[in-house]
Image (cartoon, helix red, strand yellow):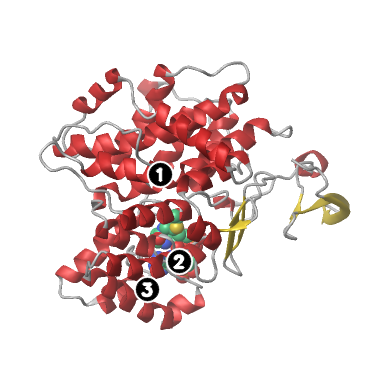
Amino acid sequence: MPHNYYTGEKAELKIDGQVHELPVIVGTEGEKAIDIRSLRGQTGYVAFDSGYANTGSCISNITYLDGERGVLSYRGYDIAELAENCSFVEVAYLLDHGSLPTRAELGEFSQMLNDFAMIHEDMIRFFDSYPPKSPPMAILSSMVNSLCSFYPEMTENPLENIDRMSARLLSKVRTIAAFSYKKSLGYPVVYPRHDLSYCANFLNMMFDSPVRPYEINHKVVAALNKLLILHGDHEQNCSTSTVRMVGSARVNLYASVSAGISALWGPLHGGANQAVMEMLQSIHESGGDYRQYVERAKDPKDPFRLAGFGHRVYKTYDPRCRIIKQACDEVLDDLKFSDPLLDLAKELEEVALKDDYFVERNLYPNVDFYSGIIYRAIGIPTSMFTVMFALGRLPGWIAHWKEMWDDPAWRISRPRQVYIGPLSRPFVPIDQR
Ligand code: ACO
C-alpha cells in the first residue's frame, strides 16, 4: 500500500490554552482526514464519535464510495461497468487480488473454486441437528466458524495460504447456503457439479431435485451474477468493520467472517432485504395502502422505519439501487414474471421521494429496496435473502481481512469510552444490602 498520503499539511487544535498540530491525510480521490493517533498522548483527550460516523478506522485501497455524489467503485472500476461486463467470480478475484484476472488466472481461480466445492461429510451431519425453521443466517454463521476445525490451515503467516483459504471459503459458503435451504425443506442435498459456473452451480444446488431436474436458465444466472457483484463490497460498513475488528485480535479468516455474517443479519444492515419484502407483502395483503406505512415511518413515536430506505453514507440515490431497479424490469420481463410487489415498491418510492420528511433527511432507497424482487422472481425464498447478501459480500470481507492482516500500521481494534457511571462506592457485604 503506498504511504504518500501525508501531505505535510497540519490541522491545529486549540484546547486548554495550547495549540496542538495533527497531520492531515488526503486519499487518492481527495478525501481528507485528520490523523488523531497522537491526540490522547498530546492532549489527554479522546475523540468521542458514537456510531463511528466521523471515524476513519483504516487506510484502504479496495473500495471507493462517495455518498454525496452516489459514486461506488471497486479497485478503481465503476460498479456499473463491472455489473454489466463481468461475472461474480471475476469481481471476487478483482476484490481479493487487486486486479481483474486474465483468462488464465480466471481459469485457475475457477478450478480452485471447483476443487473446494464439497464440504466435509461430517459437517453435512451438523445440518440435521438444527431445529426446523432455524434462521439460515444462524446456520451459516456457525457453519462458517466450524470450517476452521476442518481446515486448520492457519500457519504463522496465514497470508501464505490466503489464496487457497479464500477460494475454499468462497466455494464452501455457496455449498453451505444451498444445503441449509435443502435441509430446511427436509429435502436431500444436491452436490456441487464441476461442469457448472459459480452461480449456475449454486442455483442447481438450490433447485435441482431427484424427482424434478433443474434446468439452468442463463438469464437467471446473469441476474444472480449482477446482484452478487453489486453486493461485493461497501468499504467500512457494519459487517466489514466487524470482520476487521475481530480479525484485528489475530483471529483466523473463517471465524472473522462468521462474525461478519452475524453483523449482516441485523434488519438495519443486510437483514433489510428480507424486511423490505415482508413490508411489501404486508402492504399488499392489507389492501395496498402504502401511504399509511409512509406516515408511520415519519411518526417519531412509532419505531417503524421504511425498510430499504436511508443509508449512513449515501445522501443521494444509492448507485447500486439504480442498477438493481432497472434490472428488476429487465429480469421480470425476460422471465415473463409479473410481480405486484414491484409496482407497489415503485409507488412507495415515488411517494416517499416527494415527501418533505424524506427529502429533508436525504432518505433514498438503498441496495436492499429492490433486490428482493429479483430474488423472488428467480425463486429464492425470502428467508434466504440475507444469505444471498452474505454470498455477495464474502469477497469484500476476505479482501478487508487480508488488507488488515497485511497492514504495517495494524493494531488490535480497541476503542475508548467516556465513563459516566458512579464514582467510587464503598463495598457493602451481601447480607447488609
Ligand atoms: N424510515 C424513516 N425514517 C428514517 C429512516 C427510514 N428508513 N432512516 C432514517 N430515518 C430518519 C431517522 O429517524 C432520523 O430522523 P431524525 O433526524 O428526525 O431523528 C434521520 O432519518 C437520520 O437517521 P439515522 O438513524 O440517524 O441514520 P443512520 O445513519 O444512523 O442509520 C440506517 C442508517 C440504519 C440505514 C437507517 O436509515 C435505517 O434504519 N434504514 C432502514 C433499514 C435499512 O434499510 N437498512 C439497510 C441499509 S443498507 C445496508 O446496510 C446494506
- Pointer 2 residue: 323
Numbered mark located on residue 70 in the image = none
Q: Position of residue 235 (x, y in %)?
A: 57, 50
Is residue 108 shown above or below 56?
above
Q: First in sequence: mark 2 or mark 1?
A: 2
Numbered mark located on residue 298 in the image = 3
Mark 3 burial class by Cα count in 10 Å: few <14, some 14-19, many 20+:
some
Mark 2 burial class by Cα count in 10 Å: few <14, some 14-19, many 20+:
many
Is residue 260 shown above or below 329?
above
Is residue 187 shown above or below 295?
above
The amino acid pointed to by label 1 is Ala
- Asked whether residue 135 appears in the rendered view, the answer is no
Q: Mark 3 vs mark 2: give the one in front.
A: 2
Q: Mark 2 vs mark 1: give the one in front.
A: 2
Q: Is mark 1 within 8 Å of ligand 1?
A: no
Q: Image check: 219 left or right of 211?
A: right
The amino acid pointed to by label 2 is Ile
**Secondary structure type for disc 2:** helix
Quadrant containing the C terminus is top left
Mark 1 burial class by Cα count in 10 Å: few <14, some 14-19, many 20+:
many
Say which of 300 and 115 sits in front.
Answer: 115
Residue occupying the point 40% across, 51% down: 270
Q: First in sequence: mark 3 or mark 1?
A: 3
Residue occupying the point 79% across, 38% down: 41
Quadrant containing the N terminus is top right
**Secondary structure type for disc 3:** helix
Q: Quadrant of residue 73?
A: bottom right
Numbered mark located on residue 390 in the image = 1
Q: First in sequence: mark 3 or mark 2?
A: 3
User: Cα distance, mark 3 to mark 1?
Assistant: 30 Å
User: Cα distance, mark 3 to mark 2?
Assistant: 27 Å
